[in-house]
Image: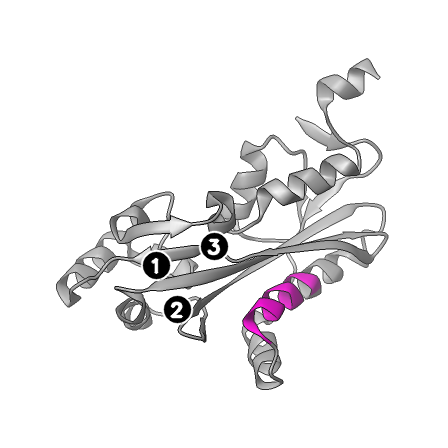
Amino acid sequence: MYNLKHKAIILASSSKSRQTLLKNAKINFVVKRPFVDEESIRDSAIAEKTTLQECAILLAEIKGRQIALSNTEAFVIASDQILESKGIGFSKPKTLEKAKEQLSELQGNTHMLHTSVVVFSGGKRIWHHLSSPTVTIRSLTDIEINDYLEEIGNEALKTPGCYQIESQGCHIISGFKGSFYDILGIPLLPLLEFLRLHGLVSTKETMVS
């Protein structure tokens, strides 16, 4: 396991994908879920001409601050991801019918996934990072889209692109550019580098010191 020498690590996210990434990296952390109306915040920010990249950072910051203000002794990690295609931001579909509409828009095209991570300490933001990997959805017929959605069911409602690239999403994706971790929902490698600079060490190293 990996720990910070003098602080606990909190992940401010209910995302199973982000939790799994940190667990697989053997990071010792706890989860505290923020309660934020992400869609309303995103819509308001866009109405004020905030870019989708800035929205991704803003949403992560709001989620992280909500948890950080009552956990000032910990490092709080928050993240967000916004899909952009042809200048338009996509949210998670609420129904399978909406998922079909979104896949029909995305098929045959390349989209960006603006993926942010923000770290708080002492209740204040001390670092953030943004990446924008790209994913290309292969050209799909209506029949293929219907068959795909029938196969994955409500899993399509968990991401704005209606896919999990690490599982059955691979059947509709023809390629991607950027870090696999970033596509899954958190810029893991820059985050780990930042944590190492702030005392992230393995349990064995802690025992030796």
Question: Looking at the image, do the residues carrying marks 2 and 1 touch, with CB atoms under 8 Å apart?
Answer: yes
**Could one spot residue 60 in this view of the protein?**
yes
SS class, disc 2: loop
Between tags 2 and 3, which lies in front? 3
Q: Which mark is residue 133?
A: 3
Question: Does 52 appear in magenta?
Answer: yes
User: Neighbour class for label 1 at 10 Å: few (<14), some, many (≥20)?
Assistant: many
- Image mark count: 3
For numbered disc 1, what is the local secondary structure?
Answer: helix
Q: Amino acid at mark 1?
A: Ala
- Left or right, residue 136 beside residue 82: left
Per the rendering, the mark at residue 93 is 2
Percent x, y for residue 122?
86, 52
Q: Secondary structure at mark 3?
A: loop
Question: Which residue is situated farthest in the left direction here?
Answer: 143
In percent of width and height, residue 165 lies at 37, 48
Gap between marks 1 and 3 measured at Cα = 20 Å
Residue 36 seen in the current view: no
Which marked residue is nearer to the observer: mark 1 or mark 3?
3
Q: Residue at x 83, y 56 (%)?
A: 123
Mark 2 residue crowding within 10 angstroms, few (<14) / some (14–19) / many (20+) = many
What is the magenta range?
51-61
The residues bearing labels 2 and 3 have C-alpha atoms spaced at a distance of 21 Å
Q: Quadrant of the N terminus?
A: top right
Q: Which mark is residue 35?
A: none
- Residue located 61% across and 76% down the image: 41
Q: Which mark is residue 156?
A: 1
Q: Quadrant of residue 63?
A: bottom right
Q: Is residue 45 above or below residue 176?
A: below
